[in-house]
Structure formats: C-alpha cells, structure tokens
Amino acid sequence: MQGRILKATGGFYYVWSDGILYECRARGLFRKNGMVPLVGDWVEIEETGSQTGYVTRILARKNSLTRPPLANLDQLFLVISILDPKPNLLVLDQLIAIAEYKKIEPVLVITKTDLGDWETLAGLYRKAGFQVFCTGWEQDSDLKPLQQAMQGKISAFCGNSGVGKSSLLNRIDQRLDLSTAQTSRKLGRGRHTTRHVQLYPVEGGGYIADTPGFSSMDLERYETILKDQLQYCFREFDPYLDQCRFTGCSHTKEKGCAVLEAVAKGEISASRHESYCRLYEEAKQIKEWEARQ
Ligand SMILES: Nc1nc2c(ncn2[C@@H]2O[C@H](COP(=O)(O)OP(=O)(O)OP(=O)(O)O)[C@@H](O)[C@H]2O)c(=O)[nH]1
Ligand SMILES: [Mg+2]
Ligand SMILES: [Zn+2]
C-alpha cells in the first residue's frame, strides 16, 4: 500500500492512504541507511491493524528540506510580517535562495499590513520577480487569491515565529482551527506556538503545511549552497550574468561586473545584492572549512 505522510510526531508517522489515516512506525532499516521519513514523503506501508502499520519504503523524492523538515514541495510560502517581528531581509533572501536551489517556487506572503508600510517591501520583491501576497487585519483581498495559489500543489508556510502563519491559515480555512499565539497565550506556552510540521488538505486539492517558526539563529546550520551556484539563486541576476567582463566573476566587487552596474542603475535592488554578498562570503568560508577537513 502507498500513501503520503501528513504528520510526524513522537516517533509515529501518520500516513494517509486510500481515505484512511494510518499510525505507523518506521522500520529499523531507515536508521541504517541514514534516511529519515519526512512529512510530504510518499511511502509504502505494511498494514498491521485497521489503522496502524509500518513504513517500509520511502519513494523517490522530488526535493527535501531539513528546516522545516518536509519533502516533495511544489512551493514555499515565505511569510514575513511588517512588525512584530520585523522583517529580516538577509534571512528572507537566504530562504528564497535555498528554495531556488532546490527548485521549489518561492512565494512571498506579507502579513500584519495593518502595522506599517508594506508597499515598499511588496514592490521590492515583485520587482525581483516574485509573486507577493499581502494580508493583515482588515486587509483580506489577497486571501482568496492565496487560497487559489495553494490549490493542486504541495506547499508550506515558513517563517519566523510570530509572523502569523497559523493565524493566516485559519483565516483562509476556518475549519483548520490551528492554535495561534492569540489563542494559546493563556496556556503560557512561550514563544513558539506551532510545535510540529503538518500537512493539511487544501479545499480544491493539494496540501498546505503549517510549520513551527524559527529564530534567525536556527538558520546557521541550514542547507549550504556552493558559492558558484549562488548567483543562479537570485533570479533577477539572470539577464546580467553573461555580460560581466571576466568569466568567473563573483559579482561582489569586480570591475566591469554587469550585476554591480545593474545595482548602481537601480535595476537590481541594493538590499538583495547585499544579501547575495553576505551569503557569498558565508559560502566561501564553508568551502574553505570543508577543504581543511
Ligand atoms: N496586527 C496583526 N497581528 C496579527 C496578524 N496576524 C496575526 N497576528 C498576531 O500575531 C501573533 C502570532 O500569530 P501566529 O499565527 O501564532 O504566528 P505563527 O507564525 O504561527 O507563530 P509560530 O507558530 O510560533 O511559528 C498572534 O498574536 C496573532 O494574533 C495581522 O494581520 N495583524
Ligand atoms: Mg503557528
Ligand atoms: Zn559580475
């Protein structure tokens, strides 16, 4: 039997197969070959009861992420709030780059538009070539288009703790009834409200994952992108990459760099290029560090 893992918690995998949710354990063999089943995985299961079983095989993955731990994503909704917490563009650009690297379409969702200027941020990322949805208390014009963008795809909401991921999913589909900082404050559960990754069915087809938020420090040991690949993870650099004077241009400080010229002319935003330079420096160090091993 085959099915999809919708939730993983406490050593159990919840596999949806043919209209039944099976509570499964994983066979020991996964530990041996170092492969851990992920939410989103398409797996083979062996029934041991009417709603229990074993995960015996993970079918080939389209892609996977370690944080949030998910497999087979079509798109990643990167959720950032205008305030509370304030956007960290370096972290955002890093997440976008990782999504691009893994061929997962990054889509931006700006929340809490009631708390300040959101048009500048939306404009910046639209100009860079991304789809951007904007929502806030008393701004729900993008809820329907956002719901439509989720249909027929496997997507995830990803972003800092407290940006309003769960609140937004509740507004899109009231039946979800996810706990949010607002509803759980009384329980005194601390900063993080959502505790596990779970895929929920989308009305009209597809799945959407709510994920626990991270703090920017968590990202240090995130996926690494090789420095020479990083340029391809900034989509607005594309038209300029073959116009630099030197082959192997790093697009950080070279004379005759077409990317730098585009930044100077305002065709590429300075903040995106700054993130690129910071990530490039990090990528360089990782390589040197690895080489020393
Ligand atoms: N002003 C304003 N506050 C919002 C909005 N959306 C959510 N909030 C508030 O932001 C807080 C955090 O919301 P959550 O939905 O729990 O955030 P989350 O991203 O799911 O957080 P984690 O589960 O910890 O990752 C709550 O107190 C919400 O009421 C909004 O559009 N405007
Ligand atoms: Mg949440
Ligand atoms: Zn260049």
Image (cartoon, rainbow, N blue to C red):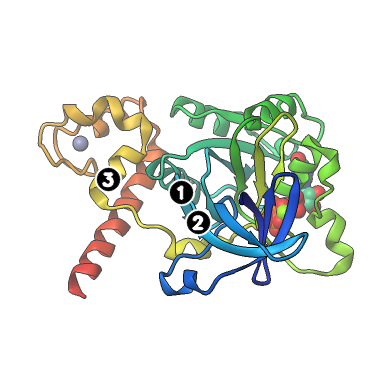
Instruction: Give me the residue at 27% from left, 53% from top.
Output: 226
Front position in the image: 175 or 3: 3
Q: Is residue 225 left or right of residue 178?
A: left
Q: Residues within 10 Å of mark 2 (few under 14, many from 20)?
A: some
Front position in the image: 30 or 38: 30
Circle 1 residue: 61
Q: Residues within 10 Å of mark 1 (few under 14, many from 20)?
A: few
Q: Is residue 153 above or below residue 43?
A: above
Q: Please state the horizontal and vertical placement of residue 249, each as a whole percent of the image.
A: 16, 40
Q: Are marks 1 and 2 in contact (CB under 8 Å)?
A: yes
Q: The disc labelled 1 sits on which kind of residue?
A: Arg
Q: Secondary structure at mark 2?
A: strand
Q: Is residue 167 above or below residue 255?
A: below
Quadrant of the image where one finds ligand 2: bottom right
Circle 2 residue: 58
The tag earlier along the polypeptide, 3 or 2, is 2
